[in-house]
Image (cartoon, rainbow, N blue to C red):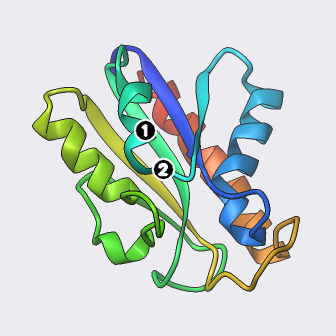
Amino acid sequence: MKGRTRIIACGNPLLGNDAAGLRVMALLQEIRPDLDMVEGGLGGLGLIPLMEGADRIIIVDATQGMGAPGDVRIFRALPPSRLFPLSLHDLGVVEAIQVARELGIAPEIVIVGIEGGAPGGYTIGLDPAVEGGVQEACRRIIAMIDEE
């Protein structure tokens, strides 16, 4: 990856494993405060202005249905939107990227997905397997950035 890279972390801190992306951002802020990171909330159209001004975007979010809890997958092409469930009131991550590309905003985009499993209701904190996936996602993101 070359140029200015921005990490956008998505997730809901009140839905347990759905907060995996936010946990990645918190850990990266501790170990690499030099990185350009922003919180993307629940995704949707709000992601589009966060993409502006960067050459490369890494979006980190929990997935649903791509494997066992904690599995990490890197998507350099748009994955199926079913892995990133839609919000009931907005577009999902994949759809927001498609809109940004149509508007000519989206630079190179990599999505880091951490399998969180089906949401189980309101809870704070990650399951141990998902926390392990967060650690792996951090390692992989740092490796991507340090390749520059």
Q: Which residue is mark 1?
A: 47
- Tell me what residue is drawn at x 62 percent, y 85 percent: 118
Quick one: quadrant of the C terminus? Answer: top left
Q: Residues within 10 Å of mark 1 (few under 14, many from 20)?
A: many
Q: Is residue 51 visible in this depiction of the protein? A: yes
Amino acid of disc 1: Leu
Which residue is labeled 2 in the image? 43
Specify few, some or many for label 2: CA neighbours under 10 Å numbering under 14, 14-19, or 20 or more: many
Count of marks overlaid on the render: 2
Q: Is residue 55 left or right of residue 34?
A: left
In the rendered view, tell whether residue 15 sits above or below residue 5: below
Q: Secondary structure at mark 1?
A: helix
Residue 111: which disc?
none
Instruction: Look at the numbered discs 2 and 1 and tell me whether their residues touch, using CB distance below 8 Å.
Output: yes
- The amino acid at mark 2 is Gly
Q: Residue at x 42, y 69 (%)?
A: 86
Q: Tag 2's secondary structure? A: loop
Is there any visible trace of residue 1 in the rendered image? Answer: no
Counting from the top left corner in percent of width and height, residue 53 is at 36, 13
Mark 2 to mark 1 CA distance (whole Å): 6 Å
- Does 75 sit above or below residue 109? below
Residue 44 pos. (x, y %) = 42, 50
Q: Residue 55 occupies which quadrant of the picture? A: top left
Identify the image quadrant of the N terminus: top left
**Camera-side residue: 89 or 65?**
89
The answer to whether residue 1 is left or right of residue 142 is left
**Farthest residue in the front direction?**
89
